[in-house]
C-alpha cells in the first residue's frame, strides 16, 4: 500500500482514512467504477455510505487528484490523475486499459481549426482485448 498523504495534501485535500483507502483502491485497480469502489470501501469501513463515496469522488475530481473516464454506454470509471493519455475499453470483459498516443499534434490541429483553447481531452477506443478475442 502506498501512502497518498502528501499527494492528497498537494491537491488541497485532507488525508482522511477514507480518501487514503479510495486512493489505494484506484492505484491497485487502475480504473474503477463507483460500485466496485463502494464494495471495497465497505470491507474497510462497514458503515460508509454511497453518498460519502460520491462526495469524496467529487472533491477529488474538483481538486484534480483523480480523473473520470467516461465510457460510452457504460458507467464512468475513475483513476488517479496522470499525464494526458487515452483509453481502450473491451466490449466483452469491460476492462479499461491506458494507451499513450502522441496527442499533441491532434490537439494543436483541433485548436487551430476551431479556435478553441482546449483544456481537457478524452479519447476512448472500444474493441475486443487480446484475452477476449
Image (cartoon, rainbow, N blue to C red):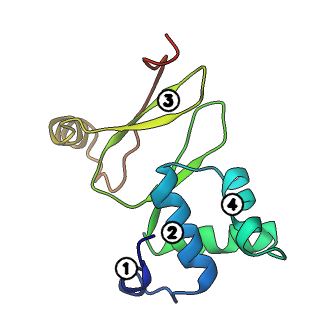
Residue placed most toward the observer, 62 or 48: 48
- Residue 41 horizontal/vertical position (percent): 70, 67
Residue 112: x and y in percent read: 18, 40
Dot 4 or dot 1: first in sequence order is 1
**What label does residue 73 carry, if any?**
none
Q: Is residue 92 above or below residue 103?
A: above
Q: Residues within 10 Å of mark 1 (few under 14, many from 20)?
A: some
Neighbor class of circle 2 (other Cα within 10 Å; few <14, some 14-19, many 20+) is many
- Please say if the residues under marks 4 and 1 sit with CB atoms less than 8 Å apart: no
Who comes first in sequence, dot 2 or dot 3?
Answer: 2
Percent across and percent down for residue 98 are 37, 40
User: Which callout, 1 or 3, points at the residue further toward the start of the chain?
Assistant: 1
Numbered mark located on residue 89 in the image: 3
Helix, strand or loop at label 2? It is helix
Q: Nearer the viewer, residue 124 or 40?
A: 40
Label number found at residue 7: 1
Mark 2 or mark 3, whichever is nearer to me: 2
Local crowd at mark 3 within 10 Å, few (<14), some, or many (≥20)?
some
Amino acid at each position: 500500500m502506498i501512502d497518498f498523504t502528501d499527494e492528497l495534501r498537494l491537491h488541497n485535500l485532507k488525508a482522511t482514512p477514507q480518501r487514503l483507502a479510495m486512493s489505494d483502491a484506484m492505484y491497485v485497480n487502475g480504473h474503477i467504477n463507483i460500485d466496485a469502489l463502494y464494495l471495497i470501501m465497505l470491507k474497510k469501513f462497514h458503515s460508509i455510505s454511497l453518498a460519502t463515496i460520491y462526495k469524496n469522488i467529487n472533491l477529488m475530481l474538483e481538486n484534480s487528484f483523480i480523473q473520470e473516464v467516461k465510457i460510452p454506454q457504460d458507467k464512468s470509471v475513475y483513476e488517479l490523475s496522470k499525464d494526458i493519455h487515452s483509453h481502450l475499453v473491451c466490449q466483452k470483459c469491460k476492462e479499461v486499459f491506458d494507451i499513450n498516443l502522441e496527442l499533441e499534434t491532434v490537439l494543436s490541429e483541433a485548436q487551430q481549426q476551431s479556435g478553441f483553447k482546449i483544456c481537457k481531452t478524452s479519447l476512448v477506443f472500444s474493441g475486443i482485448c487480446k484475452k477476449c478475442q
